[in-house]
Amino acid sequence: MSVGILASLMTAISPTNVWHSRLITPDTFVTFFSAASFLAITLVYQQGKTWQYAVAGICIGLTASTKYNGGLIILPLILAHFLRYGKRALKCTKLYLSVLLCMIGFLIATPYAILDSSKFIADLSFEAKHYSTGHAGMEGDSLKWYLKYMWDTGNCIYLIAAIGILHGLMTRSKESILISVFPLTYFVFISSFIVRNDRTFLPMTVFMFLLAAKFLIDMFYKIKNLRIGLLEKRFFFTLFFIMTAAMLTIPFSKTITDIRHFTTVNSRETARIWIEKNLPSGSKIAIESYSPFINPSKFRVYGFGRIIDHSPEWYVEQDFNYLIFSEGMFGRFYHDPQRYKREISQYDSFFERFTLVKIFTDGDYEIRIYKIK
């Protein structure tokens, strides 16, 4: 129970988990269903009852349906089965029942994998290609990026988790190895793609927190069982609690910073108000992704992924009056000028060609409004 409580505390203060709990993305559901799957898998390892295999199978199917990379959670199930039954594992039909229910659970939540299989395969291929070829602003050395992200958001927690994995392997702890299978394989998998982002990393967090908490609780009991004097033991306990508190402080402070940033009014809101009050009613406005909301009943609003998807001349020919640029889109290119020289050149051509009406930088977020004519 103490491991679960400590891991829950780590989850509650984690910048990654707190931030994405506000968002409706598949990764939050993957995190939930993978955790539910692992709970059932733990029961399979401990008790091996048929209903536990059934629950594990259904939950794994739902995990994979939510986001396909979550299907890797099936690996701990297979390991748990072999750890429990050893050489008899292949003869035990419970595993086959569980795998069958994995497929059924997946199809219940993703029926069009069968009903429209050609579309399903095409979209699956598209996503695989997407992650393999790149996504603007989320490309580069994925391994290096994820390691830096782990240090920035979890600091020593993830380091302790890694030590816990190594310790489990060295001591051949079946429980530690069982917890480690998913985060290890998942991390190798996501690091192999050129596209990387925090939400893809999210499902790993629960397992890393469990590993870190287990290692810390194991250390606590080792200190407790040391055959040393009372003063020495108090010293070690004091040192242990100070280190644990310090380890939790960094992600907690990062979460508080994120909350403050999230609740600070930024340029999307101030620009929205200014546009509503100052631009002529009926103006034809082009906006790109991550721009402010613009009242479509007052203005003629046309959305584009990127303003640069068309040339400056095209917007003139289409009789647009204003262009609205958002840092959420154009900023990603300027953050990596070596990789995105072409896109930066295209944006610069717009900024030089048209008249800057207003620029907003509230909340460290930039919105630019340009007038065409």
Image: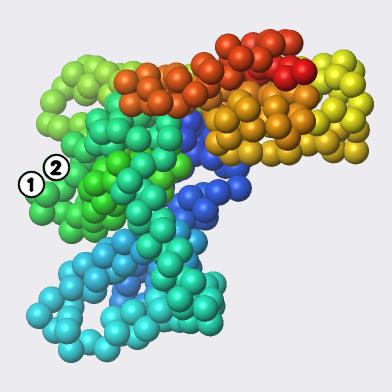
Instruction: Left or right? Give the position of 347 relative to 373.
Output: left
Cβ atoms at labels 1 and 2 below 8 Å apart: yes
Residue 196 at least partly seen = yes
Q: Quickly name the residue at label 2.
A: 166
Residue 81, relative to residue 231: is it above or below? Answer: below
The mark found on residue 95 in the picture is none
Three-letter amino acid code at disc 1? Met
* Image position, residue 323 (x, y; %): 70, 24
Q: Residue at x 48, y 81 (%)?
A: 114
Query: Which of the 4 quarters of the picture holds residue 84?
Result: bottom left
Three-letter amino acid code at disc 2? Leu
* Image position, residue 189 (x, y; %): 26, 51
Q: Residue at x 36, y 48 (%)?
A: 131
Q: Secondary structure at mark 1?
A: helix
The mark found on residue 170 in the picture is 1
* Image position, residue 333 (x, y; %): 44, 24
Q: Secondary structure at mark 2?
A: helix
